[in-house]
Amino acid sequence: MSANLLSGVSRGTASLTAELSARLSRTAVVRTNEPLARHTTLRVGGPADAYVGPASEADLAAALGFCREREWPFLLLGRGSNLLVRDGGFRGVVICLADAGFAGIEVTGQRLTCGAGARLKAVAHAARRHALTGLEFLEGIPGSLGGGLRMNAGAMGAGLFDVVDAVRIMDFHGQVEERARRDIPVAYRSCPLFRDHIALSAVLKAQPGSHEAIAERMSQFSQRRWSSQPAAPSAGCIFKNPSAIPAGRLIDELGLKGTRVGDAVVSPAHGNFIVNEGEATAADILALIDLVQQRAQAERGIALETEVEIVGQD
Ligand code: EPU
């Protein structure tokens, strides 16, 4: 270990983290050298220099201000369900909104006000408890509302923005505003607003329904998902669907299901999932992604684009 390293954390990082901690409320979480494999559904990824769980919008704005002043890169993390962190981890601050301060769900009439850290599954269940229909499809989308908004997630033929009424956002300077759905352009699996804004919460709209019909719809969606998607750790679909053919079908037709690099395997259940069978590294998963992309390009002339966000260093 070199002289300026202390338990794997450089003194510079440790003192920066202490300074950052002093700017935040006492209930905020601040840790150094946090293994990101703990925070991603793929269960891979090296450590972040610092990890922050803000307790409030003021904490979040303070953390962003600190990162700006010190030119410390930051990364927003929800439930880590669409994220591949490289094995060397992330040199900067990971800000996670999955903690209590940002994960609330409030139901008023036919509207649900949900924090960015709320699980989409929990949103679907809250709507069911209040006999509200239209949000059943959220049951099957892994991850948080914030992550889902950022990537314009969808399932079962519906998209998250179909049910958004308004979004509360913060820019990287800590300014907060509300945007109505009509003022938010979205594209397939992307929402450009979140390139320079952070979702804080959203108001989702639903309609009155019957408990039984809602429960039935949710259970049908869940059965469809479990019969076609793997249960092992994954990041959901790894590639965006190209216009010519769904990525899962293409990978299946290429005979790539079951292909493995280390413990990273193209799921035999669904071609567009890469699962971690236990000890996979990010390097294994990236090598497998590359292999699939090369075969799709060479044999079908199709450029597969990753849906999963890839961050960090090797
Ligand atoms: N298919 C195959 N072989 C496979 C996988 C799929 O032939 O190994 C075929 C299916 O039979 C179907 C077509 O490909 O005819 C499409 O497959 P599927 O219905 O499973 O849908 P998908 O397009 O692969 C999308 C979303 C999923 C979402 C499902 C269910 C994308 C990239 N994926 O998958 O979302 O759960 O629909 O609604 O849009 C995610 O985004 O992470 C995700 C899992």
Image (cartoon, rainbow, N blue to C red):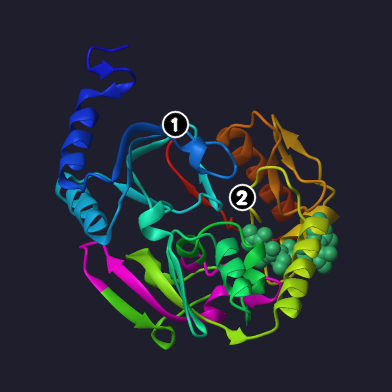
- Where is residue 276? Give x, y as percent: 67, 38
Query: Is residue 240 visible in this depiction of the protein?
Result: no
Foreground residue, 195 or 127?
A: 127
Disc 1 CB within 8 Å of nearest ligand 1 atom: no
Name the residue: 19% across, 53% down. Answer: 62
Q: What amino acid type is highlighted by mark number 1?
A: Gly
Q: Quadrant of residue 131?
A: bottom right
- Where is residue 292? Give x, y as percent: 70, 47
Residue 174 magenta-highlighted: yes
Which residue is tagged 2?
A: 235
Q: Quadrant of residue 26?
A: top left
Distance from Cα at disc 1 to Cα at disc 2: 19 Å
Foreground residue, 181 or 213?
A: 213
- Image mark for residue 88: 1
Kindly state the secondary structure of the residue where label 2 is placed.
loop
Q: Residues within 10 Å of mark 1 (few under 14, many from 20)?
A: some
- Where is residue 132? Give x, y as percent: 61, 80
Please indicate whether residue 228 sits to the left or right of residue 124 in the image.
right
Q: Quadrant of residue 135?
A: bottom right
Disc 2 CB within 8 Å of nearest ligand 1 atom: yes
Residue 304 magenta-highlighted: no
Magenta region? 149-176
- The mark that comes first in sequence, 1 or 2, is 1
Picture quadrant of ligand 1? bottom right
User: Mark 1 or 2, which is nearer the eye?
Assistant: 2
Query: Is residue 251 visible in this depiction of the protein?
Result: yes
Please indicate whether residue 136 sits to the left or right of residue 123 in the image.
right
Q: What amino acid type is highlighted by mark number 2?
A: Ala
